[in-house]
Amino acid sequence: MALAGKKVAKQILGELPLTAELYWQLRQNGKPLSTSFSLKRTEKWLPIWRSQASAAAHGASPGKRVVIFATLRYWIEHAVLMGSAMAGLGNQVTLAYLPYANWRKPITNFDLRRQNAYSHKVLDQAAPILDCVSLLDIKSNQTLPPSLERAVQEVSTRDVQYTLQIEDVDRESELYKLRLQRNRQAAQTSLAWLGKTRPEVVITPNGSILEMGVVYQVAKCLDLPVVTYEFGEQRNRIWLAQNAEVMNQETDDLWAARKDSPLDQSQWEQAQTLFTSRQSADLWANFSRRWQGLPNQGGQQVRAQLGLDDVSPEARPVVLLAANVIGDSLTLGRQVFTDSMTEW
């Protein structure tokens, strides 16, 4: 009963002005609610980043008006550092963010407002290098254009697929409803705010899932240039895409530019060495993932392990199911010969 009463109290207080913020300030003394949304590392290093960026900006040529969007602690931390560096290059950078700690679990408005107050306390120290804006502070209930509403639903479906590693999504599930509610709210606030500020470029991680995928869709809807980025299996490397979802790995422009350029000997050797390392289940260069746990063992040994004899495949068909395909298909929407691998 005490737990239920506390939950009801939070729901009531979450709707009253300043209650959550005053509670956070007086009872938590400016500290984070939990370790899952702690910006202590950013708070520690931010004065140094701000000082270095300010010094660099004095000699830099004027750049662009840039908006970087992020949510979740680790992406916000990365966005602060990247935004500081971009500001040091002369750009006018705004960090827009949503202070969520977890995309899978609901949070009361009371607790969310306390996290918002905490994020303001930390991130506002980035001024004047970064202008930090919480989209929770932007109020908008406008009806989304039909195309954007469909995109929000698609992102919400992908969120559930990504989270549960399934393809068939129950739109009556609590997870889907949570993702749809948060994504729609992010679409409404970012549409209103970006439509008013109209930056020269929007930057967001991933661009395919969660509120980051929604902000990408909003930027497209507003015809704003947008860049998405992610990190792959190579250390010290970053994936970038311009006006595209980086996770789709679109290479049309790259192929058009390089298709008539033959590989030289060193490039051939590089490709061969990479292929050999994959066969041997070894790491190569700056790659951090093996992709398979055992080296290539040969067909004869595999047949012996599986108990296969010399009977022709026509007499006894064998189906190979590639384990990683399901992740690729559900995340990228690339079901080729059936609607889903479940159906296959």
Image: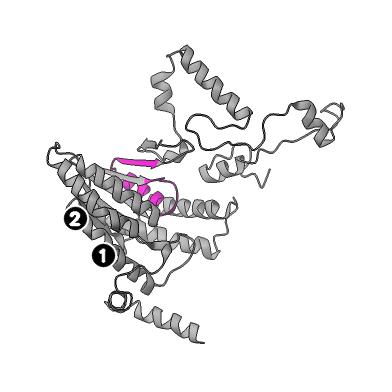
The three-letter amino acid code for the residue at tag 2 is: Ala
Q: Is residue 183 above or below residue 272?
A: below
Q: Label for residue 121?
A: 1
First in residue order: circle 2 vs circle 1: 1
What SS does tag 1 mark?
helix
How many numbered tags mark residues here?
2
Residue 183 in the image: x percent, y percent? 41, 58
Left/right placement of residue 54 relative to residue 338 reads left
Check whether the beta carbons of the residues at disc 2 and disc 1 lie within 8 A of each other.
no
Q: Position of residue 110 (x, y in %)?
A: 36, 74
Q: For this view, does 48 lie left or right of residue 316?
A: left
Q: Which residue is mark 2?
A: 127
Please report the residue visible at 63 percent of the width from the left and 36 percent of the height from the top. 292
**Secondary structure state at the residue bearing disc 2:** loop
Q: CA distance from mark 2 to mark 1?
A: 12 Å
Q: Amino acid at mark 1?
A: Lys
Q: Is residue 176 left or right of residue 309?
A: left
Give the position of the C terminus as an image quadrant.
top right
Say few, some or many: other residues with alpha carbon within 10 Å of mark 2 (under 14 / 14 to 19 / 20 or more): few
Number of the label disc, if any, that sits on residue 172: none
Magenta highlight on residue 224: yes
Residue at 51% across, 37% down: 288
Magenta part of the protein: which range?
A: 205-229
At x 54% / y 60%, what residue is drawn?
171
Is 191 placed above or below 301 here? Answer: below
Scheme of colours in the image: one colour
| Residue 65 in view of the camera | no
- Residue 188: give x, y in percent of width and height: 33, 59
Q: Is residue 209 magenta?
A: yes
